[in-house]
Image (spheres, rainbow, N blue to C red):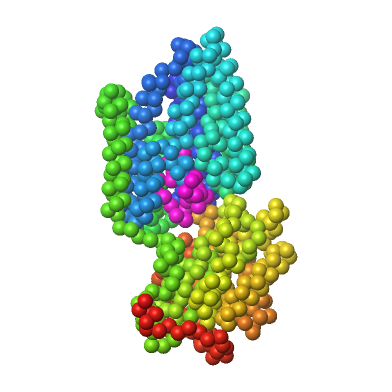
Amino acid sequence: MEYVPALDGLRGLLVMAIFFFHVGYPWASGAVLSLSVFFTLSGFLITRVLLDQGLATGTIDLARFYSGRLRRLLPAALLCVAFILLLSATALGSVPQSVRGDALATLGYFANWHFLFTGHSYATLFQHPSPFLHFWSLAVEEQFYFVFPLLVLFVARMTRVRPHIRINLRVALLIGVGISLVATFFAAAAGNYNFVYYSTISRAGELLIGGVAATFVAVGRLVNAPPRRWATALGVVALLGIAALFSMTSPTSMWINYGGLTAFSLASVALIIGVLPRGPLSSLLAFEPLRQLGRISYGAYLYHWPIILWLSPERTGLDGDLLVLVQALTTLILATASFVLVEQPIRRGRMLRPRQAGIAAPVAIAALAIATLTVTALMPHSLTALELASDPKARVPAAADLAKLADEEPVRVLVVGDSVAATLTLGLSATQTEHGLAIWNQGQLGCSLERTGDPVIGGQLQVASSHCAWQDRWPALLDEIHPDVVVSLFGAWDVPDYSIDGQWRPWGSAERDQNMLSELNAAADLLTSRGARLVLLTVPYFSRPTVDTQTVWTEFQPWRVNHLNSLYRHWARSNADRASLIDLNGHVSPGGQFADTIDGILVRDDGVHFTVPGGEWVSRWLEPQLHRIGTDQRRNHPDPPIPALTKRRAHD
């Protein structure tokens, strides 16, 4: 095939869409489809290269193919990894363990499997962003590039009549598409949508469909053909259809999980065929700025995501379109420099001869792996609030705190709930001695009050963990701590819709209301069985966004939180003899709206969990109330006796 300027223009259009998605424009939430078009285009072009060689020689020069792919892709990728390591160690404040694993997976071109097995959903990339996350798609392509030539070589060797290679390869590719679809359907049926999104086998269908299109001889001839009205019409319809789907799709859209992306690749093929011959659509996509962007699209894709994370509003003092402009210009500058100074010289053999490149590639990968281990070993270890909350040492009062309280018997407070409760309690624990409290943090990450069924959060079916069975954990805690007050904060995992015994149970239905009140009664019976008073905290509003960074996840919409809090209020009024209700939501949601920053303090940094300073801010309001409730409970219910916190015990 001759050079087709419109294909570079198409690349430029696709990388622009991905950039606008990552900077947070709501209308660009369908960038998952841009990646799909990239996959199909890649499969189409690679198949043309290998098929032409197979038809001409009856075999495939694997060494030449692999060498060409490495010279084209590896230098810029290694340079970008080094750039991200520098940012992680200096500006981003990344967690060393995450950087180490992500970087090594990227260097080994298995980043997609790494993010899959570590549970890093692409639908939540804005909550805990990894600067390496976008390498998952490059890993899928590289794994495909490694296996696919072997398939073409096998077909070429097994085909006696050389022209039949085209037909036999088409059959083999269609079988591969079928295998990919079967794997996709099984994963989706099991609720493993991350597998559908990340795995090479499920995404191979999009690449293989492009390969199938390349096996038709007429497609290759379109490049040199005069304008074809039918091709232009096909391309225009495909482009408009893709644009319409783009505006309605996000990584959490359910239709993509059941073979939708493989089916969508048919539209991608139609668009590719539509721009191959000369015509109005081809001329439009060959628009020079768009074509030049397409030429550097690989570098633009590599650099745009870490640059977006680096040039944040907090670091630049900018926001809105001006910030996006700065991020875009920085991306273009780095991508252009990479293309001119590194990619093209190495690809054309001007910087490294083929034999030198063969030695330099493994040496450079090994050097970057060593640099990764060294840099992450020297990086300061900073824990997030969630990581701190999961530390067993953070669950009990420190000995120093108990020593301060030894001269007076503090009010014993046991906190139960989910990860929101766990992070809030970190701030409470930091100030507990100021208000005469001894606080035990028993918030469990990923747990709900309801013990039956599995919630759907962010479009993913979440299987309830066995460590959430509170009826097994709480009795021993109550016997050991003997609290005056038990604080309960559940909600994030209760407000989603549930699948119970295979039946869909939406939040707000009569069945869910009855189940929630039944679970609340059972929990209260247990928590107050040793003489403690139960304190229910209303659930704060959430603002964990979808990938467009604007729209709240369906599971976290305010009406769901309001409904749960109304159930809590109703129950608390009916159980005033053993429970109190404190309106945490009213305190941290001024004006009835979610707020991440209050009084100049970042209270919740990810839209859900409390920061330690945020918890300390809440403590100044909440802890005096807990002390009063605990003191009244101890005065009104002196029996059974409460073991004293003596100086000896505090010292121990």
Can the viewer see residue 111? yes
Q: Quadrant of residue 636?
A: bottom right
Q: What residue appears at the point 44 percent right and 79 percent down from the top-left corner? A: 438
Answer left or right for 580 relative to 134. right
The one nearer the camera, 181 or 555, is 181
Taking the spot 42% from the left edge, 61% from the top edge, the residue there is: 387
Residue 380 drawn above or below residue 483: above
Compared with 649, 284 (above or below) is above
| Rendered image quadrant of residue 366 | top left
Task: Looking at this view, name the residue that lies furthest to the top.
Answer: 161
Q: Residue furthest right?
A: 510
Q: Position of residue 10 (x, y in %)?
A: 48, 33
Rendering coords of residue 170 (x, y %): 58, 21
Q: Nearer the viewer, residue 440 or 625?
A: 440
Q: 552 or 360: which is nearer to us?
A: 360
Q: Which residues are magenta?
A: 116-137
- What percent of the width, then of the height, locates residue 131? 39, 48
Q: Is residue 426 left or right of residue 539?
A: left
Q: Position of residue 600 (x, y in %)?
A: 40, 71
Q: Residue at x 35, y 53 (%)?
A: 96
Q: Is residue 122 magenta?
A: yes
Q: Residue at x 47, y 61 (%)?
A: 606
Total residue callouts: 0
Q: Is residue 73 magenta?
A: no
Q: Quadrant of the C terminus?
A: bottom left
